[in-house]
Amino acid sequence: MNKIASSCLLAGLLLLSGCTSLFSEENPTQKTEERASEESTTQQDSNPVKGETIRLASFSDRIFMKNLRKEPIILDNKIINYQDRTLAIYDESTFNLIKEFKIELDTAPVALDNGHLLCVTEGKLMLLALDDFSLKTLAQLDSALFCKPFVFEDKIFIQYVNNFSECFDCEGRSLWKILLPIGSNYYKQTAYAPCFEDHALYVAYPGSPLVKIDANTGRVLWLSKSLTEAKSFVPASFAINQVATPLQVQRHKLFAQTLLGDLVIIDAETGRFLGKQLIAPHSTIQLDEKVAYFISQDLALTAYDLQKQSVLWSIPNMVSDPSAEAHMTHFSGEGNLLVSLPNGHMMLVDCEAGLITQQWSHHYGSCAFLTPSLHATRFYGLSDRGSLIRFHESDFKFHEATLFQDIA
């Protein structure tokens, strides 16, 4: 009897188990989709996105940064814009199209002092003459580029994605080539550019140290380990995607802006980390010889003494959203700062007193100012809607007739 009862109990348990399994089983289609989603997420995490989008693994709700915009070039009374595999050249005064090329560029073109454009296409370094629109091949490049070519003095500096760097003369002859002793990199950056000062190049890669290179010989002078070791410099979770853009060298100090926005100060002679100033992530930095201007993390327009490393003045509540872009440039000399905010508000600020002297609004959003400006009384801005805007110093107004829609 006990055996019969045990058998019945076991059968009941098995039946109950089967029923439970039947009702709790996941939808096969849903399960397949979820597995594919998980595999896709894993693949994205292990293989950073190539191209002009940077993967930020530490963000959960903002996985990708927006694509970095290629700015149009203003050169010799011409506006040069590259978009959708088309290099277009316009008359600066009338915005009329002069010439158009169907060409696929690997990076944004670079303007040279002689009125030529430096272009990279199909792995070749090429020179485009704007007088007769002829193309000349300077050199064959060994790999994909990390950023657009950097021109200093009469030399062309190339950073490859495989951590090699190469320097050419203006005729395309290779002067030196080195392998930087830093981690692997497979990103492309369009906003980043190296810095040149006193026969030295300051370069960086995401998640890697800043590097100082002798521009004449290619010899590495120092590697700043701040990016990978100093916790006060950048959170560890950002290390793989962190790149510091060298801005300028003043009084033996290197000033750089990180991907998170911080203004970082490094000893230019030794590479030693000296300190940083917290900045809103999407604020640009305007540097003078002694002062840096930026939107701080408390959303105030701040003037920062570079020598004393202290705040000179601040104007509170300049922006309401810490993720919004704010741009600034000098206007009519270094005594005035022109600031463009995301809501279309613009203002002129007295740099000495820290006071707003004029302000006005427009409906084009925030404008990234293009430098250098072609004329003292004309300034150009690239709006966040992709429009090239020209305005005049006399009235500070944006004119519809001068609006060039969707230029970038």
Image: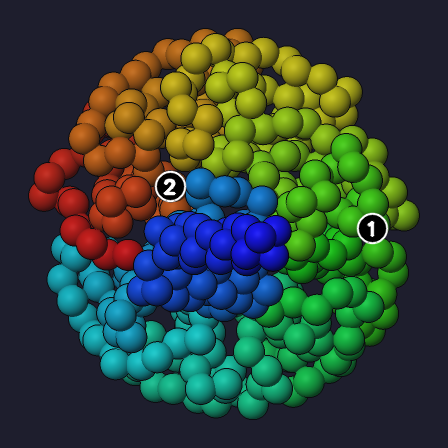
Q: Residues within 10 Å of mark 1 (few under 14, many from 20)?
A: many
Q: Position of residue 361 (x, y in %)?
A: 23, 22
Q: Residue at x 84, y 56 (%)?
A: 223
Question: Does dot 1 land on a helix, a strand or a loop?
Answer: strand
Q: Give the number of callouts.
A: 2
Q: Is residue 188 above or below residue 86?
A: above
Left or right: residue 347 versus residue 152 is left
**In the rendered image, the vertical position of residue 261 relative to residue 49, given as above or below:** above
In which quadrant of the rendered view does residue 166 lie?
Answer: bottom right
Q: Earlier in the sequence, mark 2 or mark 1?
A: 1
Q: Mark 2, residues whose alpha carbon is within 10 Å: few (<14), some, or many (≥20)?
A: many
Q: Amino acid at mark 2?
A: Ala
Residue at mark 1: 224
**In the image, is 317 to the left or to the right of 256?**
left
Q: CA distance from mark 2 to mark 1?
A: 30 Å
Residue annotated with mark 2? 368
Q: Which kind of residue does numbered mark 1 sit on? A: Ser
* 151 sits left or right of 283 in the view: right
